[in-house]
Image (spheres, grey):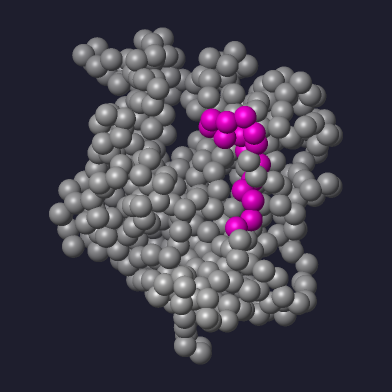
């Protein structure tokens, strides 16, 4: 149905359990609701506190426009993006018959815990909704507001935001025809790392029933590492490392400080941030929200209470090329950079036939993404209801063919959204539609049934599905 024919129909509305009404928009036969608040705006005294539930309200609210992303400094540009009123979510839902309940997918975006948002056209949920799913994309606090470990403030606020959003889904998704007992949470990079954290947190129990983790970035900070990062941000922003000083500081100064630390390894080293910490802010092992490193916490929780959970997890074959190829970054990596990373992580360097850049790229791809994905698949194979694993190997032609199967290149295929601008930046203008149909179909089948269409990663011969040949598979 065309956009023009939508104009003659009354806009779709839903009534939330507390009585407030939302008005969305049509996308063909899909109902789309954007910018829905799931928690109060975290400003003033609430800025560094756990999320507070949005109070019940009466009347009609418009839900046709995306809300702002969490405040962040763009990769290129001279003006901050977003606003603090970012604890919003978006819903794509097909029409349902009275009493019908459809499985739900909840998307957690990535971005290194300091960048990104659910509003990118790449994450449009229409393709999943057309598969008979209710699709939800959520936002959470990023950067200083979400993950700086400030004195006298709640830790891991961004993770607590995600818990709040998932609780909102449990309470409210039924008004769109969603089944709160069939929720698949899925994410990529920092989004997948956050889900790995949630899997080991008691607060998440019962909030989702299946999980998909794409390139899970599970590295967390100790309290000491978090304190070092806080000192670095404070020094660059010219403020004291206290809650009060950060609350009063111009937001742009804090955003720029995080941006500069993320972009410059030498600057991180100068401020004492170790080479294994690729980004300056991470979830923090605070002893309360996170009691241990995510995979250790998860293993302990699952051994004590084997979960009725189905897991799909994987990584890309050449993850770190996203960070090292653009701008000819591979050529700027020195032997010292390689040796420092090897010493920090205990990983052995490869034969000298490869350049330091190529060696570091491979070591980091393994350390940050491949090994966590493999360990998650093994843990799920032992304790969870089921485990499925994949490796994405299709090589993008971007950057003169050097980008390859880099971090994030699978996203256009997962969402079957090859025409989005971000998708074409990652995969080019001629990405294989067959591969998108295959991968998107597998994700939808998993959310619908728990089976993506290949054998489990368990037993004597654990299966790993490969996504590289567009014509392979069904």
| Number of numbered discs on residues | 0
Find residue 3 and report its horizontal and vertical position in percent: 46, 70
Q: Quadrant of the N terminus?
A: bottom left
Instruction: Judge left or right: residue 219 versus residue 239.
Output: left
User: Is 107 drawn above or below residue 326 in the view shown?
Assistant: below
- Residue 72, located in which quarter of the rendered image? top right
What residue is drawn where x is 57% and y is 16%? 267
Q: Which residue lies furthest to the bottom in this view?
A: 98
- Residue 254, located in which quarter of the rendered image? top right
User: Camera-side residue: 217 or 421?
Assistant: 421
What residue is drawn where x is 74% and y is 62%? 53
Dominant secondary structure (helix, strand or loop) of the stretch shown in magenta = loop
Q: What span is colored magenta in the figure?
A: 66-80
Find residue 366 and report its horizontal and vertical position in percent: 35, 32
Q: In which quarter of the image is the C terminus?
A: bottom left
User: Camera-side residue: 265 or 183?
Assistant: 265
Find residue 109 and report its horizontal and vertical position in percent: 50, 49
Is residue 26 among the parts visible in the rendering?
yes
Q: Say if the magenta span includes residue 454.
A: no
Is residue 382 among the parts visible in the rendering?
no
What residue is drawn where x is 50% and y is 61%? 106
Find residue 272 and report its horizontal and vertical position in percent: 60, 17
Instruction: Judge left or right: residue 132 versus residue 467.
Output: right
Q: Say if the magenta span includes residue 78.
A: yes
What residue is drawn where x is 41% and y is 29%? 323
């Amino acid at each position: 149905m065309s956009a023009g024919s939508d104009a003659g129909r009354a806009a779709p509305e839903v009534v939330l359990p507390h009585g407030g009404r939302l008005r969305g928009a049509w996308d063909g036969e899909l109902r789309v609701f954007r910018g829905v608040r799931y928690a109060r705006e975290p400003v003033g005294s609430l800025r560094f506190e756990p999320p507070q539930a949005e109070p019940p309200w009466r009347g009609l609210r418009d839900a046709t426009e995306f809300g702002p992303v969490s405040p962040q400094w763009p990769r290129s540009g001279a003006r901050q993006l977003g606003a603090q009123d970012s604890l919003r979510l978006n819903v794509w839902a097909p029409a349902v018959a009275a009493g019908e309940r459809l499985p739900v997918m909840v998307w957690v975006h990535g971005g290194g815990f300091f960048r990104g948002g659910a509003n990118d056209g790449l994450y449009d949920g229409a393709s999943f909704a057309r598969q008979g799913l209710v699709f939800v994309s959520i936002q959470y606090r990023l950067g200083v507001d979400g993950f700086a470990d400030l004195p006298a403030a709640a830790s891991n606020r961004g993770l607590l935001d995600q818990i709040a959003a998932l609780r909102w889904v449990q309470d409210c998704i039924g008004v769109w025809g969603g089944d709160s007992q069939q929720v698949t949470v899925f994410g990529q990079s920092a989004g997948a790392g956050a889900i790995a954290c949630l899997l080991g947190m008691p607060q998440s129990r019962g909030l989702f029933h299946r999980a998909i983790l794409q390139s899970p970035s599970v590295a967390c900070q100790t309290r000491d590492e978090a304190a070092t990062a806080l000192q670095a941000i404070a020094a660059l922003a010219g403020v004291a490392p206290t809650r009060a000083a950060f609350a009063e500081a111009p937001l742009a100064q804090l955003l720029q400080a995080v941006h500069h630390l993320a972009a410059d390894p030498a600057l991180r080293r100068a401020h004492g941030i170790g080479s294994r910490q690729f980004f300056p802010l991470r979830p923090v092992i605070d002893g309360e929200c996170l009691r241990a490193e995510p995979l250790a916490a998860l293993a302990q929780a699952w051994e004590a209470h084997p979960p009725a959970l189905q897991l799909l997890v994987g990584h890309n074959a050449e993850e770190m090329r996203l960070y090292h190829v653009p701008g000819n970054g591979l050529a700027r990596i020195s032997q010292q950079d390689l040796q420092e990373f090897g010493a920090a992580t205990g990983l052995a360097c490869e034969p000298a036939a490869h350049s330091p850049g190529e060696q570091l790229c491979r070591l980091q791809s393994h350390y940050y993404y491949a090994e966590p994905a493999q360990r998650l698949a093994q843990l799920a194979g032992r304790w969870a209801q089921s485990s499925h694993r994949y490796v994405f190997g299709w090589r993008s032609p971007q950057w003169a063919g050097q980008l390859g199967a880099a971090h994030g290149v699978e996203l256009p295929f997962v969402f079957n959204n090859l025409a989005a601008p971000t998708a074409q930046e990652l995969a080019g203008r001629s990405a294989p539609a067959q591969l998108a149909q295959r991968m998107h179909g597998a994700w939808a089948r998993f959310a619908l049934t728990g089976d993506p269409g290949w054998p489990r990663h368990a037993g004597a011969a654990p299966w790993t599905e490969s996504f590289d040949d567009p014509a392979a598979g069904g």
